[in-house]
Image (cartoon, rainbow, N blue to C red):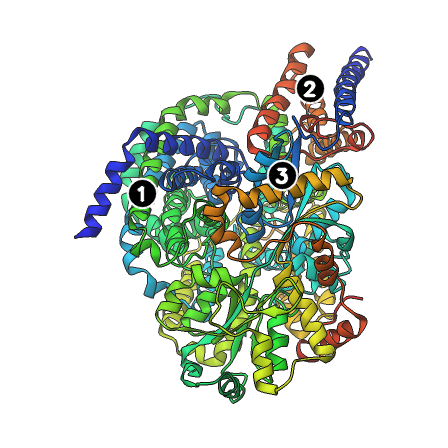
Amino acid sequence: MPEVDFFFQALTDMFTPTHLFFLVLGTMLGLVVGILPGLGGIAGLSIILPFIFGMEESHALSMMIGLLAPTTTSDTFPSVLMGIPGTAGSQATVVDGFPLSKRGEGARALGAAFTASLFGGLFGAMVLTGAIFAARPIILAMGFGEQLLLIVLALSMIGMLTGTSALKGLATCTFGLLLGSIGAAPATGEFRMTMGSIYLSEGIPIVIVGLGMFALPEIVDLLRRGTAISETGKLGKGWFQGFQDAFRNKWIVLRCAVIGCVVGALPGLGGSVVDWIAYGHVVQTTKDREGFGKGDIRGVLAPEAANNAKEGGALIPTLLFGIPGSGSMAILLGGFILVGVEPGITMITEHLNLTFVMIWSLALANVIGAGLCLALANYVALLTTIRYALLAPFMIMLIFFAAFQATRDWQDLIALLVMGTLGCFMKRFGWSRPALLIGYFLAPRLEPKIYQAAQVYGWSFFERPIVIVLLILTILSIYSAWRFSPNRGKTYEQEGPHGFGNKRPQLVFAGAVVAFAVFALIDSFQYHPRGAVFPMTVSIISLALSIPLVISIIRQKAANAVLYDNERGLAAEHNEYHYLGWIVGMLAIVALVGFPIGCALFIFIFITKKADGSMLRNAALGIAGVSFLGIMSHFLTLRYPPGLLQTVVDMPWWLGG
Amino acid sequence: MFKKTTLGGVAGAFAIAGAAIGMTAVSAQDAVAADFSGKRITVIVPFNEGGGTDSYTRFMQPYFQKYLPGNPRILVVNKPGAGGILGGNFFQQRAKPDGETVFALSTSTISNFALGDPRVKFKLNEFIPVILSPRGITQYVRKDLGIQDEKTIKAKIEKMRSFTPDELIFGGKTPTSGGLNLRVALSMLGIEVKSVWGMKGNGPMALAFERGEFTVNYDNTLSFKNNRKKLIADGIAIPLYTLGVVNEDGTIVRDPALPNVPHFMEVYEAVNGKKPDGDAFEAWYSLYQMSVTMSKSWNLPAGTPKDIVEAYRTAAKKMLEDPDFIAKRDKMFGPYPQTIGDGAFAIRDAATTLSPNAKKWLGNYVQARYGVTLGK
């Protein structure tokens, strides 16, 4: 049994000091980039690529895998504690993780998340071990038709994430699909809805949509509440309780790990929605759904088990076919080429030893990563007890910096501001942000697959067995969304956010959504049929959903699901425009003096105005924040957005030149 | 009131400190030429991390760090978007001719420039190439078509012509993306294929080919040999022809990476009894220069002083002689000769300009077949 020999040989190799050193180094870096919002495996891998060159193959591979594995573990810190997804893989974790933090149970949520992550990661590594020999025919069975249905199935998960009004949720989804079709049409390359902007010709970067939907609205909301994140000001019981939660719900963790592996491995979906699929699944399959969205620990376990298991899954097509399952896998492939390993069938014929090194690295990195995160959980959770006005300017600086890394263009910052404003109002009026995000993410995958399946198979694709199975699953998923909706037959109190009152603000917002669909529809008339049919169809569906919604809002005379305005019952000193105004102000300073100086000033002014304290301390905080960014940029070889000053005076890079 | 003044004061202090540091940086800059000691050189890659141009750039990065005078630190900055146009515009606008900014170029950026994409704001035909790296392309088909049973090149092509477009399914990104020259070549041979658009790259296309959904496909020859080993070993992928490479006296010869496979010109001659000519050929030849001869390159901005250009060329030459590079070059550079020096200008000009007739022909071609209009 030579395979088994290789398997254990690789394990023994792992425990040589140099190997462990590179693995741990990679893991540490992975933990850091995972914690920083908006940066993930892609940023991490591009830091180490220059050093990979010339390294011994197995060292380089364990370092790269070591880096990738824990990013979806440590990204839970900002998701749970700040409500800001650390990477795209932990967006769903925010939904229940953050309310837990607000309740003062941040450490428990982290404990549960890390335990689930650890299990997911190990499960992924285990599946990879077997799949490397057996998965080839399965992946080859997934043709265009199967991939199309897989995307449709994922889209049906939105049924569980619509919020209180199904009509509103579905309208949001079509809005997301339209946003996702901005830019070059996949089949013709025509530029849709770009209004002549070159920036938009590639669509809005996914990182920016994610940060805009989840990070900025949370920051603004917390600032308005004016407290620490933990409303009790306490930490509650520590991570050990979360550890126990994971064990109590072991079947959920296992099921979601399976989902993560499968979604990661199969072509067509891309890993970024795996957390939402797992989340939708757990809501679908549990009986007491009342607590979801308000801090149900199962809503943390599901996405965390899935997003770590995904890595093992995504390595299957990467290693077997040399075809990356995700963005970070694409860079991993780049790294393979630099060390001279060609992925493909040779990974099980010639390079089996390296394959096993990677599998062991994946497992070990998960153990090290989760272990370190667990050890730190109680301390990092202390952040939630700090007054938020002290944290907010740093968070704002970080997410704008992360947004800038999307295309390194000033318009990234503008795009984040626009998306963030949209997110704020969606949050306020109860439009499901996950539904928008999933629609946005799946649109550019759905559209080409429709053409491809139609062109290659015509109607005959409905005769394919896997297509039929996926179709039945989709119908079941839609049925259960309708049948088991947590909001079915629910009534609403006049006192709550669903109450009857001033409807003008939400009507304006709903009107804007209708207007966008009209714009998309008119815009679509000018293109080649292959470029027009998708936005045209979606915008008509969008209008068919949002116009009745507007009418329904107008006609309601009492509390109802379609009426939602979070402003009712929220006593805050300032409205959202106040803090959005602060952010615009920061961008204005940055535009004048560049990012580092502008942010230092912003931190100083913000803390002085909003939290007081000695001005000397605040200036020090400003400089410290920017220095931290500078050190990070140095090691990550990242750049800053320049300001007007930089065009006049030549400055070194760390001042934005 | 007091508070405001202080705020202003601090702001001023920040600004002055910034300006002062900036000044010293400026004076240090113009001290010496063609010595990069202590400098940070930025290579702009207008594509994502992990892509072909990114790997190409990161592969060369350590050698240029080693061989450029003063051993500068070289950073790779990815500025993806719009098929390299965003990065190109950025480079045109920002890069000073001081050798501290380099632009990595690949086929799709050149073709966006040459085909007149209205978003292009850079003058590619003025960039100064440092190193040009050609890469062959191989067109292959599935064994189910049975062309392997035909003995002569002519018979193989006749067989290909006998299929309906529904049997010859050929994927691609968009009508005007990288595969256009292969479609034109097939048309010149009288082979009609059905194009399926919206593919995300050559990886997914090869997978669809392996599944049998596509029956016609292409790859750059190196990745065909290295990444499609199983397809070749199982006899699923049958090479039809390569596009060949241009040798020193400007004629197209067989691809040195697949010397047993005939090149397109050979095939055309075998089928038609004469060399291809006319507007169609001219259009094809321009597309060919873009995708094969100038497949990947590093470029300096227009107006870069001669000593800096020479420093880069010398570094590139030293890289080619580096034993470590020689040991590793096969997977990235293959057996293809690299162009460094003034010879690169002629190739650049050929690849970046499309004669009016050729452009008109190509415009009609994509309009008639795919309903897509080319830029001006």
- Is A352 on the left or on the right of A653, as rendered? left
Kindly tell me whether residue A460 is visible in this rendering: yes
- Is B175 on the left or on the right of B352, as rendered? left
Mark 2, Cα crowd under 10 Å, few <14 / some 14-19 / many 20+, is many
Numbered badge on residue A604 = 2
What residue is shown at x 52% (from left), y 77% (from top)? B169
Kindly tell me whether residue A536 is visible in this rendering: no
Image quarter of residue B195: bottom right
- Of residue A576 and residue B43, the one placed in the foreground of this image is B43
Kindly give the residue lying farthest to the front in the view shown: B249
**Whether residue A529 is situated above or below residue A307 in the rendered picture:** below
- Of residue B101 and residue A481, the one placed in the foreground of this image is B101
Disc 2 marks which amino acid? Phe
**Whether residue A614 is situated above or below residue A96 in the rendered picture:** above
Disc 3 marks which amino acid? Arg
Element under label 1? helix
What residue is shown at x 46% (from left), y 38% (from top)? A52
Which residue in the structure is indicated by mark 3? A568
Which residue in the structure is indicated by mark 1? A357
Mark 3, Cα crowd under 10 Å, few <14 / some 14-19 / many 20+, is some
Element under label 3? loop
